[in-house]
Image (tube, rainbow, N blue to C red):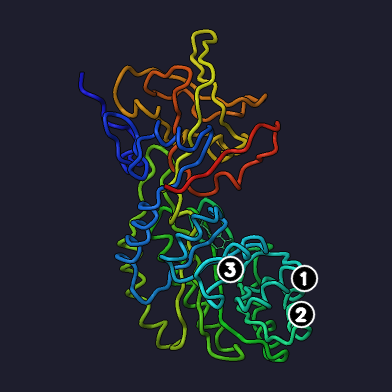
Amino acid sequence: MNAPRPKHAPLTQFEVVDDTLVVGGVPLPRLAARVGSTPFYAYDRARLTERVALLRRHLPPEIHLHYAMKANPMPAVVQHMATLVDGLDVASGGELQVALDTVMPPERISFAGPGKSDHDLRCAIAAGIVLNLEGFGELERAAAIGRELGITPKVAVRVNPDFELKSSGMKMGGGPKQFGIDAERVPEALRRIGELKLDFEGFHIFSGSQNLKAAALHEAHDKTFALARRLAQDAPGPVLTLNIGGGLGIPYFPGEERLDLEAVGAHLRAILPEARRDLPQAQVVMELGRYLVAEAGIYVCRVVERKESRGQVFLVTDGGLHHHLAASGNFGQVIRKNYPVAIGHRVAGGERETVSVVGPLCTPLDLLADGMELGRAQEGDLVVVFQSGAYGLTASPGGFLSHPAAREVLV
Ligand SMILES: *Cc1c(COP(=O)(O)O)cnc(C)c1O
């Protein structure tokens, strides 16, 4: 019998030899032995490099690419990304420390995130990175800390735009938001930045995340540039940086179509000349998390017990929602769909059966695959969850039920 083709496009992105998954040139069982225990996350270095190259091919060359670290803050991953991208975006004081350990010059590191503590602000100003200001209180506190340290803070204004990024998985702007300063109040913030004589860097306008629709991104890009041009009229100095956010999505579920990156690039190429005319000194930055790292990562766990309950097969593994909340369906808050999953040494062929892959937690929500057709698996076999390089381990409730932490490896 011919091996059926993998049903899910993302599966084909990893090399498969003799129906066994190969990660970073290493067959999965050997990688598992090398890591020493399951569960673990593995990130493929070459795939990260390729992804940045893909973006460079399709986006206008004058656009700088920043890596939004919160998608995957593993220090080894950040070190690798720092050699490929033009800047890093951090969202906490902890991420800042990891970013400062890389080759990235501080002036190419920016810090966004509501509720920055005085401690965060002090570290950031002392390091000489760019603060994306999220509110008026933060503006005043940053100025005071700058005076105390004898350093002029470099600041950009994070704008809560007066529009939304349509069809995005998560809206980060538009309407009332805890992020950024409402566009209509930005002139007031700019005036204050001028009075306090802070170094004005520019604007950060991030409207949404996980978007697969090029047309929605085109519209958001048009509106972002228009808004920046409008706001620049009240700026205390030239706009040196215009961070247009990111929002590029990746396919997770059957039927989702890959984002047309070529179209996104073509549209940006078409609108950049106008932006350049009005904002001649602005370096345009796109900051991406998920799009850069998600498809380069897998989560691997091991079947501890194979059991049947009333005709249904359950593969009970040592991994689950405590390491990979997103693949479980985020604690039952959304309509659950299966991430692409495979058995490590029976990726596409062999005997197939419909099973549910569950974890060891005492909740029916601890589910990695629900009624999915996989290669037949036994106790000891490895289960792989694809599309797991972003918002995985650090975005999961690791303390829930006190099981061991998952390891991470960059191959
Ligand atoms: C989370 C975040 C990103 C990254 O979003 P992705 O959807 O992972 O690309 C970028 N910028 C800011 C400010 C963020 O908070």
* Cα–Cα span, label 1 and label 2: 8 Å
Mark 1 close to ligand 1, CB under 8 Å: no
Q: Is residue 299 left or right of residue 7?
A: right
Label 1–label 2 contact, CB within 8 A: yes
Q: Where does the image place residue 118, in percent across and percent down from the top left?
A: 77, 70
Q: Are marks 3 and 1 in contact (CB under 8 Å)?
A: no
Q: Amino acid at mark 1?
A: Asp
**Mark 3 closeness class: few <14, some 14–19, many ≥20 residues within 10 Å:** some
Residue displayed at 44% across by 43% down: 387
Residue that badge 1 annotates: 118
- Residue marked by disc 3: 100
Q: Which mark is residue 145?
A: 2
Mark 3 or 1, nearer chain start: 3
Q: Residue at x 45, y 41 (%)?
A: 298
- Identify which residue, 151 or 217, lies in the foreground: 151
> Looking at the image, which is closer to me, 95 or 397?
95
Label 3: element kind: helix
Q: Is 267 placed left or right of 113 in the picture?
A: left
Is the residue 213 above or below the residue 322 in the image?
A: below
In which quadrant of the rendered view does residue 171 lie? bottom right
